[in-house]
Image (spheres, helix red, strand yellow):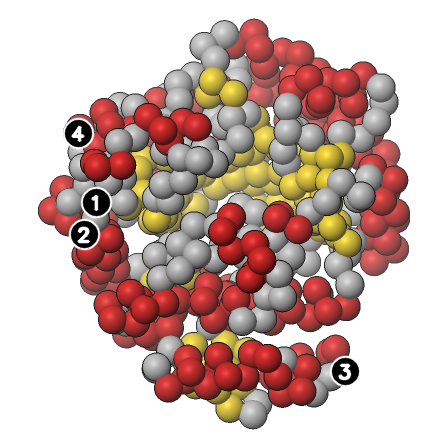
Amino acid sequence: MTDAIEFNEGLIRRYDKAGPRYTSYPTAVEFHQGFTAETYAEHIALSNQRGGPLSLYFHVPFCDTVCFYCACNKIITKNRQHAEPYLENLYEEIRMQAELFDSNRVVEQLHWGGGTPTFLTHQQMRELMAHTRQHFTLADDDKGEFSIEIDPREADDATIKLLRELGFNRISLGLQDFNPKVQKAVNRIQTEEQTFSVLDAARREGFRSISLDLIYGLPHQTVESFSETLDKVIAASPDRLSVFNYAHMPDLFKTQRQIATADIPAPQVKLQILHRTIDKLTAAGYVYIGMDHFAKPNDELTLAQQNKQLYRNFQGYSTRAECDLIGFGVTSIGKVGDAYVQNVKTLPEYDEAIKAGKLPVLRGVELDDDDKCRRDIITRLICDFALDIPVIEKTYNLNFNDYFADAIEDLEQFAQDGLLQYKWDSIEVLPAGRLLIRNICMVFDKYSQQARQRFSKVI
């Protein structure tokens, strides 16, 4: 499938502007504090009426050391005791949320993210999973998709063995880059031996999917240096790869101020790195799923995309579109009923809410019919690289050309530029348009114009 994506530097340069990654629609920028715990409870009731499986996300915010590029919500500490009060509150939140959801609904998807989930001790991991199983019904290993993010510096053979025993069957390893100069500049010193020993352990323990995360655009990276990292990764043959574009936004993320802007590759070099990455991975047999993600041809993501069953949420691409997502812990985001909801962002706020017996809801947004229609269009485009227009018209009882009259001019321009084919009954994103899928989605986003300054560039 090497022809599934075409690198057209002229088009990329023309269209390289800021825009959302569309892990939700509306995006988190539109969440507001008028959405309360009571509003959330109303949407849980709606969700229970509809039924269906559940997905659980647990945010473990602690990290031992700071990675300067990181834009995640994290707490840097070497004191492992800091996790204890947080976990006690997390157990209580699990209990409170579980009381609101129909106990017959099966959890088909579960994810621990962070931060660094393996910051927790082995006993703490056991307790967190035990509390989860006490209050929710988890699918068996054949049906469940239970994943965890791993920092290979915070894991060993015993950790991987324990995680498999706890029920995890998918694993994502943070790497970013093997080059020593790059690692020093971003304060993440991580050896090949550390990384690949964890990967090998995951294979021995029978994890069904192993993913590696890389970042291009970090300080001191060159086409040649990143190619060396890619060669080593390809030789290890993970099932999936995420190759993210580093977005340098020091005004928004304080830790990024530790990175010297002068050390960041020039835009031209970043494009060359991306081009080489695409060439190498597709030549090695990986399929470009979209939005920085690559997978082997027999991977579940690839198969889901081929069957038009791929979905996108806050963890990236997913195969469980039918699941309502419940978020636990500080900053976590859920999607329940016709709403998105986000928890409070600080440990004191979280502690105060839990101690008061309240759900720690900070903000959220309810979707109206227009939001749901636009979300459906954006999801299908970003997952399938195609849109069946009559299906949208029938589902939402509208005339596509009339309803989206303001988008037609942009679609026609995209078609002239060779990004897509636009017909009366379909939109088909062409190979040259796949890297620019965020631009295509933006024409259906009624919020994107006023919020665009909050997002990173698409390439």
For residue 269, the mark is 2
- Dot label at residue 44: none
The reply to whether callout 1 and callout 2 are in contact (CB within 8 Å) is: yes
Q: Which mark is residue 265?
A: 1
Q: Nearer the viewer, residue 122 or 444?
A: 444
Label ID, residue 181 = 4
Q: Residue at x 62, y 61 (%)?
A: 447
Report if the CB atoms under discs 3 and 1 are less than 8 Å apart: no
Local secondary structure at mark 1: loop
Q: Earlier in the sequence, mark 3 or mark 2?
A: 2
Above or below, comparing residue 422 to residue 67 in the picture: below
Q: Looking at the image, do the residues carrying marks 4 and 1 touch, with CB atoms under 8 Å apart?
A: no
Which residue appears at 70% of the width and 64% of the height?
Answer: 371
**Is 413 rendered above or below residue 250?**
below
Tell which tag, 4 or 1, sits nearer the viewer: 1
Horizontal side of 329 relative to 298 (left or right) equals right
Which residue appears at 86% of the width and 34% of the height?
A: 99
Name the element at disc 2: helix
Q: Nearer the viewer, mark 4 or mark 2?
A: 2
Q: CA distance from mark 1 to mark 2?
A: 6 Å
Q: What residue sits right under mark 3 in the picture?
A: 397
**Where is residue 138 shown, x and y percent of the image?**
69, 39
